């Protein structure tokens, strides 16, 4: 069913990118994770999609996801690259605080 939807979107909107089968599943996971979470829902809109995907895929605990979502200015305007964020999320623990302490 999802593959059919991806094929339909590609066929009817050939210039529209990002609606692959894999991304449609990610969109669903994203929605299911944050729907109804009034505390975190507004925060996810402040980060780029790739940052959200990293946080979502590598942070299984809600409090860890919230930690990274609460620092959008540092993550984006502060210039933390997707690769740096990926490493920080993967390491987790007390290193999270150091990530933000060293960023201007």
Image: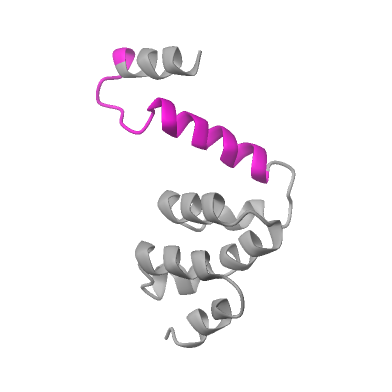
Q: Nearer the viewer, residue 20 or 93?
A: 93
Q: Residue at x 39, y 28 (%)?
A: 19
Residue 34 appears anywhere in the view: yes
Residue numbers of the magenta segment: 11-34
Tag count: 0
Q: Is residue 64 above or below residue 5?
A: below
Q: Residue at x 30, y 13 (%)?
A: 11
Residue 45 appears anywhere in the view: no
Q: Position of residue 82 (x, y in %)?
A: 37, 62
Q: Is residue 50 above or below residue 24?
A: below
The majority secondary structure of the magenta stretch comes to helix
Q: Position of residue 36 (x, y in %)?
A: 74, 43
Q: Is residue 104 above or below residue 60?
A: below
* 28 is within the stretch colored magenta: yes
* 4 is within the stretch colored magenta: no
Q: Residue at x 53, y 49 (%)?
A: 57
Q: Position of residue 62 (x, y in %)?
A: 69, 56
The image's colour scheme reads one colour
Q: Position of residue 25 (x, y in %)?
A: 51, 31
Quarter of the image that includes the C terminus: bottom left
Q: Residue at x 40, y 71 (%)?
A: 77
26 horizontally vs 32: left or right: left
């Amino acid at each position: 069913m999802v593959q059919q939807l991806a094929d339909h979107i590609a066929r009817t909107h050939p210039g529209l990118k990002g609606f692959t089968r894999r991304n449609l599943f990610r969109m669903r996971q994203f929605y299911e994770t944050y729907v109804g979470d009034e505390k975190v829902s507004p925060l996810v809109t402040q980060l780029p999609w790739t940052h959200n995907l990293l946080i979502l895929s590598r942070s299984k605990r809600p409090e860890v996801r919230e930690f990274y979502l609460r620092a959008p200015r540092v993550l984006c305007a502060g210039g933390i690259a997707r690769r740096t964020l990926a490493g920080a999320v993967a390491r987790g623990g007390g290193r999270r605080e150091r990530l933000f302490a060293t960023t201007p």
